Image (cartoon, rainbow, N blue to C red):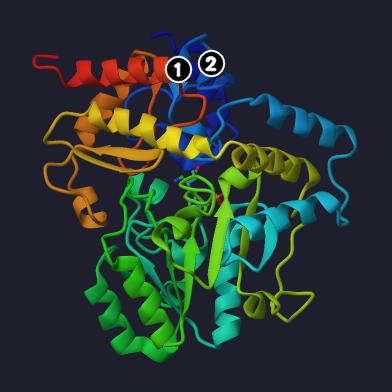
Amino acid sequence: MKQERSAALLERAARVIPGGVNSPVRAFRAVPGTPPFIVRGEGARIWDADGNCYLDYIGSWGPLILGHAHPEVVAAVEEAASGGTSFGLPTEREVELAELICEAVPSIEMVRLVNSGTEATMSALRLARAFTGRELVLKFEGCYHGHVDSLLVKAGSGVATLGIPDTAGVPGAFADTTIALPYNSVAAVEQAFGRYGDRIAAAIVEPVAGNMGCVPPAPGFLESLRELTLRHGALLVFDEVITGFRLAWGGAQQIYGIRPDLTTLGKVIGGGLPIGAYGGRADIMRLVAPAGPVYQAGTLSGNPVAVAAGLATLRYLRQHPEIYRELDRRAALLAAAAPAGLAVNRAGSMLTFFFATGPVTDYDSARRSDTARFAVFHRWLLERGICWPPSQFEAAFVSAAHGEQEIEATCAAIGEFFAPGS
Ligand code: KE4
């Protein structure tokens, strides 16, 4: 597989960009080979600087539920950009997106648009601390909520992929406000509330974890979290940056029937352009400046071009609700291509093949995976034109552009990898 141009681009990039990438997971540090430098994408496919074509299961780490360069998204971006790319003043388009989010997710009565998932979770926690007057936050090991200082404690995604123990530069005082518990452990949550109950401002959780690889909630876990936070006066924050509008029109909270106090969103709601959002109960959101004293701001928040891409994406999903059933069916075919003995976790169109023998239900069991074998699997697929997320601790994403032919080709390559003697 030719990678000369990508290799040369990586060397050039590394002279001016740390590690040659603008986000660590893109560096392919946990798998062999050079990260492909992409020149374009269309539908389920991406092409790199050496002319290689791949079926893409990274999907920009979640945003591209409709696939690359969807005509309606591109047209919306072109139309918005031709009228100006940013004003620093309100626009009707932002109101339309906020209204659409509130319509789709009943727990979100008011919402603030920001520029990334990190901004969304950082702001949601600041708001939770202001609303409750408390400081401590519960998170779950292996979950990743962006590079918020206090949430980088036992985080997943790139922190797990690179094996960074506790990231440099985070003051102890910040880390000390975070209590990290095992995902899916109700007992640990009960113990934490028993010990710190009236000091806990919020529990933040990925309702379906994607950042230790895909790990769905155990039956009753989310319900217990909702009940315990209510009982102890803490807020429940669902980080749906990945799952929002991905697992269902109303997100994971629609599937599991849980009403969190705050929800964070990102990825799909921007259709591939920079965006994030946090929202929830109006009595909480009204504390956000300028309505209230909790300051949060952003030069490009609600950017008209990003909002146009998000609106086009969400409107398309609303007009084609059958997409969710079809995504689920196609991802199930992929999951079924793995042999018995491999731990395959899936929730809708997000899935992970864990090279682990037992079930993977939390970060400790995920980390028992054979990451070296995963790296061989990743390279096997890449050389056959399939670009799988380059980490055991990430989820793969199926898009609406992955049709029967793409799914069959992927299943065949997966089956070949696991065939005896391969
Ligand atoms: P961003 O700041 O990267 O937009 O969002 C942070 C974030 C928050 N919450 C969840 C549940 C997330 O998954 C993320 C970001 N996801 C990672 C991949 N799993 C982004 C990829 C990257 O870091 O390059």
Mark 2, Cα crowd under 10 Å, few <14 / some 14-19 / many 20+, is some
Where is the C terminus found, in terms of image quarters? top left
Of residue 40 and residue 49, the one placed in the foreground of this image is 40
Residue 146 image point, x, y percent: 50, 55
- In the image, 15: left or right of 332? right
Can residue 170 be seen from the camera position used here? no
Q: Which residue is mark 2?
A: 47
Considering depth in this image, is 127 or 24 the residue closer to the camera?
Answer: 127
Do we see residue 101 in this rendering?
Answer: yes
Q: Amino acid at mark 2?
A: Trp
Task: Give the residue pinned by disc 1.
Answer: 54
Rendering coords of residue 143 (x, y %):
38, 57
Task: State left or right for residue 293 relative to residue 365.
Answer: right
Label 2's element? strand
Q: Which residue is depicted at the point 29% across and 20% down? A: 411
Image position, residue 377 (x, y; %): 25, 25
| Amino acid at circle 1 | Tyr
- Looking at the image, do the residues carrying marks 2 and 1 touch, with CB atoms under 8 Å apart? yes
